[in-house]
Image (cartoon, helix red, strand yellow):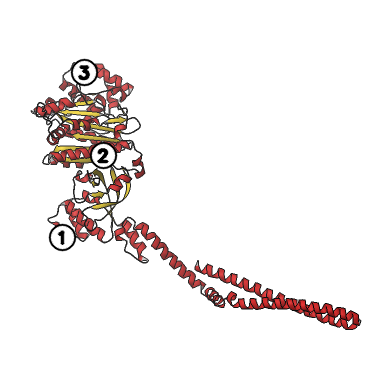
Amino acid sequence: MALLRKRGTMKNASEHEESQVETSETVQNELSLTENSAFQEEENSNSKSPEDNQESFKKRRVRKKSANGEGSSSSNDASDLSSREPVKRRPKKKKIRVELIKDSPMDEDNQSEESSSDNQEQAAPTASAYYPDHSNHHGSGKGQNSSGKEKDKLSINELTRMNMGDLRAFAIDKGVSPDNLGSMKKQEVIFAILKSHTSVGGGITAYGSLEILPDGYGFLRSPQNSYLPGQDDIYISPSQIRLFNLRTGDTVSGHIRPPKEGERFFAMLRVDSVNFRDPAEAQTRIPFDNLTPLYPETRINMEREGGPISTRMINLFCPIGKGQRGLIVSPPRTGKTILLQQIANAITTNHPEVYLIVLLIDERPEEVTDMRRNVKGEVIASTFDEQATRHVQVAEMVIEKAKRLVEHGNDVVILLDSITRLARAYNQTVPTSGKILSGGVDSNALHRPKRFFGAARNIEDGGSLTIVATALIETGSRMDEVIFEEFKGTGNMEIILDRRMADRRLFPSINIKRSGTRKEELLLTETELQKMWVLRKVINPMDDIEITEMMIDRMSKTKNNESFLRSMNTSSVTD
């Protein structure tokens, strides 16, 4: 641009000089013409009479005066132009113009290099905008460092999924001293890896569920740690919470920056998505409590090729729809946990669009490990060796996360084991009201578990929240009986497991006569509904154990429920 400007000024100066030269030449021509005309007049006057000569002399004098006046004015103009010429011509700039023309190829190369370096300097802030604390690179290598930094990113969630042995080996590769790893817990090792990674300019990404504290700020809790607070939690500022209209339970993902001096936690630098959607959508969503609940209308298909008979039996006798609120009433050791696992695998196989959460409250650690290894969904657990406040915190995070996903139109399924133990935890944590029910249950203790279970619903404008929870009976505890009686009428689907069948090692131990779904006509086809009514009339006089044995035998001989219904008729059932 500087070269073009210089060339433009030189061109204007040269044009001005040429115009000045032309004006000076015209003035000189006019002077010469006046002198020639005067000379010719003098010659003519010699040939004329004296009187004519006198008149011509007078005319000649007037003409000379006028010519002298014009000559003086033209000379003045010429002198003015000559006095202005050194300023207008600017010989120095003319030399510069010649030099620029001679050196233009080199200047263009230099300009291209400067433009490329300028482009790199302009591109570097955009690449390092996510990591302002590490934007101390300069020169042509800045673009390379920024591109390498984009590639060299670590995900906190991926580190959390690693076992301790692999995590320690990875920490040593990242420059963490092996002497300190022996006494570190898993979250401390992850924190050390992230600090070492960011010290060399690496980037960090993470996602988690937001928990907003009473002071206005919040933290992203990792689902891999079952939302347990730790050093690797991500700080969310109050301004970010207000900007994106965030609430407790929102699944937030984005870029992370390391803690500055005096800070303890990593902080969110840029929000990329909220509940797997664009952050702008979170500002216009309708709150969960303002959504219209409906009966379940879409069945969740539990039948899969080569799958267990238990899910096929559930699919016919007690179908589960999107938005169902179901109870699995189970005595101890009747296979309720295995049944939940089979339901979870059927959902992940047949309905990948459904977001599945398995919530284990007050469970044994080995069952938690088995569930995580055999279920593809999100498994959140709080074992029996943890405090009741921990059980409550996990349950609140799960239900809030599910509500936020439903607000965006997603279908969510929560499999809870068990709601009885969750009610026990609430009974220990709520402030005492002074009113104690039978079994030692506080009158206010069951309100929040009911609110958890009552959140299951089908939404009119899209989205659904399905909750299938287990309720314990025949445990010998009066408290468990009271809890079951409180929840017995709240669900719209019940699966009753029989202890007598489990003692005979008859699995699934489903009491078909007592199990069922409200408004099943909305979930079953017309053909299935008619045949199921006929089948229930036929098996009603039979014993519970005989019914289950017969159904297991007949279903094992057919590939799917469609062929089973075709093979079943009144004559074959009574045989």
Residue assigned mark 2: 401
Residue type at tag 2: Lys
The tally of labels here is 3
Q: How far from the left and from the top, in percent, is residue 22?
A: 68, 74
| Disc marking residue 178 | 1
Local crowd at mark 1 within 10 Å, few (<14), some, or many (≥20)?
few
Q: How far from the left and from the top, in percent, is residue 384?
A: 12, 39
The label nearer to you, 3 versus 1, is 1
Of residues 505 and 346, the one drawn nearer to the viewer in this rendering: 346
Q: Is residue 198 above or below residue 20?
A: above
Residue assigned mark 3: 539
Q: Is residue 79 visible?
A: yes
Q: CA distance from mark 3 to mark 1?
A: 68 Å
Residue type at tag 3: Ile
Q: Of helix, strand and loop, which one carries label 2?
A: helix
The label nearer to you, 2 versus 3, is 2
Of residues 240 and 306, the one drawn nearer to the viewer in this rendering: 240
The residue sitting at 17% across, 51% down in the picture is 186
Of residues 559 and 247, the one drawn nearer to the viewer in this rendering: 247
Q: Of helix, strand and loop, which one carries label 3?
A: helix
Residue extending furthest toward the bottom: 46
